Amino acid sequence: MLETLKQQVCDWNRALPRYNLVVWTSGNVSARDPQTGLIVIKPSGIEFDDLRPEQQVVVDVDGNVVEGLLKPSSDTLSHCYIYRQRPDVFGISHTHSNYATAFAAVGKPIPCVLTAMGDEFGGAVPCAGFALIGSEAIGQQVVEHIGNSPAVLLQRHGVFTVGKSGKDALKAAVMVEDIAKTVWLAMQLGTPEPIPAEDVAKLNFRYQNIYGQ
């Protein structure tokens, strides 16, 4: 079932190490099928180079396995919580990318000091609290703190991103690491000035409604 979505989720997961967002077996991408509401997610503890479409696990919105011979990701319950609370979300990514996770390690949001942040995130990337892996607790932190942003940091943990598809969530993960690196480098030179809120709103509107084809 959901063979096309399994292939896509496999491809999106395999892209995580290509963009230097994860190492070894950490991190994951999931996607929700709009027709059935079922979720396809990476299996737990499988190296990204070894991932195959048929290994992806199908779960229902409560995290019960519907199809799959392997255990789903240890973050499955948190992914499911986010999907239940956010009917607009159809893709989720979780990474431990270095620069973004450095901000998470000290519990600091990434300030909106770049036009690219206004474009993609509509403001600062917020930082949620600390929660342990394996339950809905991380998902609760994500929903509580992410706001209108597609990305949120998890204190002393990593990054969660959401989108209208798994590809959108992956893109947000790539972008948050890129801006986190630039902001960190800028902080070594001085104190970057935040972009005024009214300009951030203009940047975000243009990017979301006018930019591109």
Image (cartoon, rainbow, N blue to C red):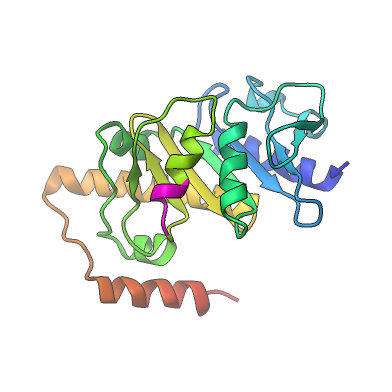
Q: Is residue 141 above or below residue 67?
A: below
Q: Does 145 sit left or right of 108 as displayed? A: right
Which picture quadrant has residue 48? top right
**Residue drawn at x 35%, y 65% as measured from the top left:** 118
Which picture quadrant has residue 46? top right
**Residue drawn at x 32%, y 65% as measured from the top left:** 115
Q: Is residue 63 above or below residue 172?
A: above
Magenta-colored segment: predominant secondary structure: helix
Q: Does 114 sit left or right of 37 as displayed? A: left
Q: Is residue 133 above or below residue 4?
A: above
What is the span of residues highlighted in magenta in the rendered image?
Answer: 143-147
How many marks are shown on the rendered structure? 0
Q: Is residue 31 above or below residue 163?
A: above
Outermost residue, left side: 190
**Residue drawn at x 75%, y 56% as measured from the top left:** 34
Residue 43 rendering spot, x and y as whole percentages = 69, 26
